[in-house]
Image: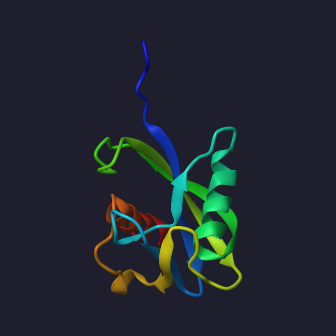
Amino acid sequence: MRHKNPLPTVDIIIEHKGGIVLIKRKYTPKGWALPGGFVDYRESLESAAKREAKEETGLRVELVRQFHTYSDPERDMRRHTISTIYIAKGKGVLKAGDDAGEAEIFKKDNLPSPLMFDHKKIINDYFTRRY
């Protein structure tokens, strides 16, 4: 019997130049999101977070801490995922890459729309708990 398990993912709240970095997804579902993605086989969550940040934003990141894990089965309309969120400091020049069409810095009071998946909740939790 085959088991159907949720897939592990990471998302990164990258603090950079006075705001947080969001990417505009190139592929469906399209919209703004935290940088992140699937954890590869034999890859740690921390390594996946650093890799995804670099691939999608061009930034090297220093992971500050693990923020929270979100596991609502409805958080991603494509499949059931469990995402561990990291807070990180970004270093370098911001440049969209991989499956990110754009990458920009946003502040709490100027977030773009639409925010994909459950990222609006994650970002609101971050701003509420962080400061």
Q: Nearer the viewer, residue 64 or 8?
A: 8
Would you say 56 lies left or right of 42 here? left
Rendered location of residue 78, percent (x, y): 33, 48
Q: Could you tell me which residue is drawn at 44 percent across and 64 percent down?
A: 129
Q: Could you tell me which residue is drawn at 50 percent across and 72 percent down?
A: 100
Q: Could you tell me which residue is drawn at 48 percent across and 51 percent down?
A: 68
- Quadrant location, the N terminus: top left
The reply to whether residue 11 is visible in this rendering is no
Count of labels in the image: 0
Q: Is residue 122 above or below residue 31?
A: above
User: Hey, which residue is sitting farthest top in the picture?
Assistant: 1
Q: Nearer the viewer, residue 85 or 75?
A: 75
Q: Could you tell me which residue is drawn at 51 percent across and 42 percent down?
A: 8
Would you say 131 lies left or right of 93 here? left
The reply to whether residue 32 is visible in this rendering is yes
Rendered location of residue 10, percent (x, y): 53, 53
How is this picture coloured?
A: rainbow
Rendered location of residue 103, percent (x, y): 51, 80
Q: Nearer the viewer, residue 28 or 123?
A: 28
Asked where in the image residue 93 lies, by quadrant, the reply is bottom right
Rendered location of residue 64, percent (x, y): 66, 63
Q: Is residue 74 above or below residue 17?
A: above
Asked where in the image residue 94 lies, by quadrant, the reply is bottom right
Would you say 85 lies left or right of 72 here? right
